[in-house]
Image (tube, helix red, strand yellow):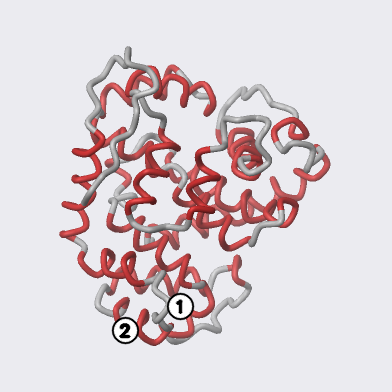
Amino acid sequence: MTVTPLPVPWEGAHHLFDLEKVLASIDTMAAQRPVAAQIVSVANSDDTSAKVLSRILASDVALASRVMKLANSAYFGMRGRVTSLQFAVTVVGFTTVRTMATVALTDLDDESRLPENFWDVTTSLALAASALAPRFGERPQDALCLGLLAQMGAALLNHNDREGYAELVDDNPDFTARRTAELRRYGINSLRLTAVALEQWGFPHGMTSRLNQVDDFTSLEGGLLRSAFEVAARLTIEDHDTVPIVRLSCGQLREDDLVPVLDQVRADADELRRAMLGE
């Protein structure tokens, strides 16, 4: 893998962080999950079809089972009606299959290697982003994938500095403050690291640019994920100091808009989590 060197924004980072080494470690993980790695590689190709993708997917029984379970979940409204893997691929879409393969090959399905409450936050992020997507002119399924992958960088930081990152999370329950602390410690924050990793795998610029704009409160492009993080914080962080959603969303949302979203996330998060983890 060829990695474009990144400038380190803060040369005073407290922890030696080798970006190329971290991204190379993903290649090592990918070698252990060849089917998932192949799906990540081919799912965005112009000549890939549901038939081709389902044939590759069938070689990884666990991953195929998760795709089937997600296709039959409440989110897609096809409860029990998806009986073939090819149909499941069509229902969830190629980007979602690619996202699920990325989760598998980066060990995001192994909770023993993840920061505390990783999937509680991730499912809240994904469902909130999907529900709010139309208000930002986005496709709900693309927003779901963005939310599912957003925290991959946090998992990579945790993989490479388990004790230090756990302490950082404990000290910074607020997501925005946590990213500032990540930048101070590692020279890069978790969302930027996610974006870099996804860029290496050819994920669309529209996804990576949204990750990079979250902390610019003037950026409408970052507004969807920024708003989804606020929903996730309200649901997963005890004593969270709420931030006005109108500010986070660049005026696209009001507080009343979040009431049904919070209810929907509460209702669907556990099923999404079980589908993603194969439980």
Task: For the residues labelled 1 and 2, say whether their Cβ atoms are less than 8 Å apart.
Answer: no
Q: Nearer the viewer, residue 226 or 45?
A: 45
Quarter of the image for residue 275 reads bottom left
Give left or right: position of 199 versus 132: left
x and y percentages locating residue 218 in the rendered image: 68, 31
Residue visible at 41% across and 34% down?
Answer: 190
Mark 1 residue crowding within 10 angstroms, few (<14) / some (14–19) / many (20+): many
Give left or right: position of 73 versus 113: right
Marks 1/2: CA–CA distance: 10 Å
User: Which numbered marker is on residue 55?
Assistant: 2
Q: Secondary structure at mark 1?
A: helix
* Residue position for label 1: 89
Check the image and report above or below for 44 versus 206. Answer: below
Q: Earlier in the sequence, mark 1 or mark 2?
A: 2
x and y percentages locating residue 279 in the rendered image: 38, 61
Residue visible at 51% across and 52% down?
Answer: 207
Q: Secondary structure at mark 2?
A: helix
Q: Nearer the viewer, residue 43 or 267?
A: 43
Residue visible at 28% across and 74% down?
Answer: 61
x and y percentages locating residue 69 in the rendered image: 45, 71
Disc 1 residue type (three-letter): Val
Number of marks in the rendered image: 2
Q: Nearer the viewer, residue 163 or 196?
A: 196
Check the image and report above or below for 54 versus 204. Answer: below
Disc 2 residue type (three-letter): Arg
Mark 2 residue crowding within 10 angstroms, few (<14) / some (14–19) / many (20+): some
Residue visible at 55% across and 56% down?
Answer: 144
Check the image and report above or below for 212 versus 272. Answer: above
Q: Nearer the viewer, residue 67 or 208?
A: 208
